[in-house]
Image: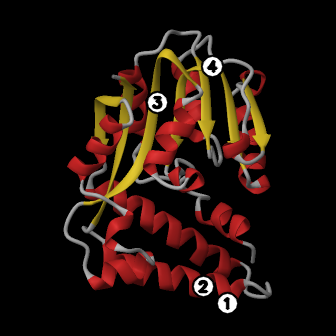
Amino acid sequence: MDRLRLSSIAHTHHPIAAPVSGVNVNRLLRRAGREPAARILDLGCGEAAWALQALAYYPDGVADGLDLSPYALERAAAAAAERGLADRLTLHERDARHYAADGDYDLVLCIGSTHAFGGVEGTLHAAGRHVNADGVLMIGEGFWAAPPTPAALAALDAAPADYTDLAGLIDVAAKTGWLPVYAHVSEAAEWDDYEWSWTGSLTAWALDNPGHPDAAQVLEVARDHRNGWLQGYRGVLGFVTLVLRRA
């Protein structure tokens, strides 16, 4: 099964696609403090859960959502139609690195997709180019909540230098000209809900489709991911969503 289809199945019951609860998505959007007619860009939008909630929060706003996954964008379009927001959300199946906007945005989101730009610093530079002078950049990124163990590094296929601690992450933002006006550090319950949803959605799909040629592989991916989380990075890798403005 291709990676994009696998990810789409994994996020079936957690379209937010990050260890953040719906309550805290709303809190972050409220702290972003944009006007009702905000122009929004979601880079690596997935099923566009963040962009759609922003449109609900900013009732006269419009949004663009970019992602490479046709499966995620299909669900995003369906969700937008179901919520009566299809006329305010434009979806683009394209690489966020090469997006040329027709103007700038009041709020730019990049939650859990900094890998598209080579990491946090690259995201701050690239995504930041789309933010207007008084706008907000909101990014979601991992950090070491505890010193990384060999088991955590193996599970994440990561090196210690791939993440900083939380203070180091704020330093990176400041060095590139961005300062936090708010942040949310995901709690253990949010992480657990995300991981159980991710692995559980894959497991349920495989059990519901026992004759599918990819069923065994999907079960294996779910098992390996679950073991890596529970035996490796649970409590070691943190996640923070930063609400940033230019220094």
Rendering coords of residue 87 (x, y %): 78, 22
Rendering coords of residue 81 (x, y %): 76, 32
Q: What residue is shown at x 29% (from left), y 84% (from top)? A: 150
> What is the distance, in whole Å, between disc 2 and disc 4 at their CAs?
43 Å
- Give the residue pinned by disc 2: 219
Disc 2 residue crowd, few under 14, some 14–19, many 20+, Cα 10 Å: some
Rendering coords of residue 116 (x, y %): 59, 53
Q: Could you tell me the amino acid type at mark 4?
A: Asp
The secondary structure type at the circle numbered 3 is: strand
Q: Is residue 185 visible?
A: no
- Give the residue pinned by disc 3: 137
> What is the distance, in whole Å, between disc 1 and disc 3 at their CAs?
40 Å
Answer whether labels 1 and 3 touch (C-beta < 8 Å).
no
Which quarter of the picture shows residue 219?
A: bottom right
Viewer-nearest of discs 1 and 4: 4
The secondary structure type at the circle numbered 1 is: helix
> What is the distance, in whole Å, between disc 2 and disc 1 at their CAs?
5 Å
> What is the distance, in whole Å, between disc 2 and disc 3 at their CAs?
37 Å
The secondary structure type at the circle numbered 2 is: helix
Using the image, determine if residue 146 lies above or below residue 31.
below
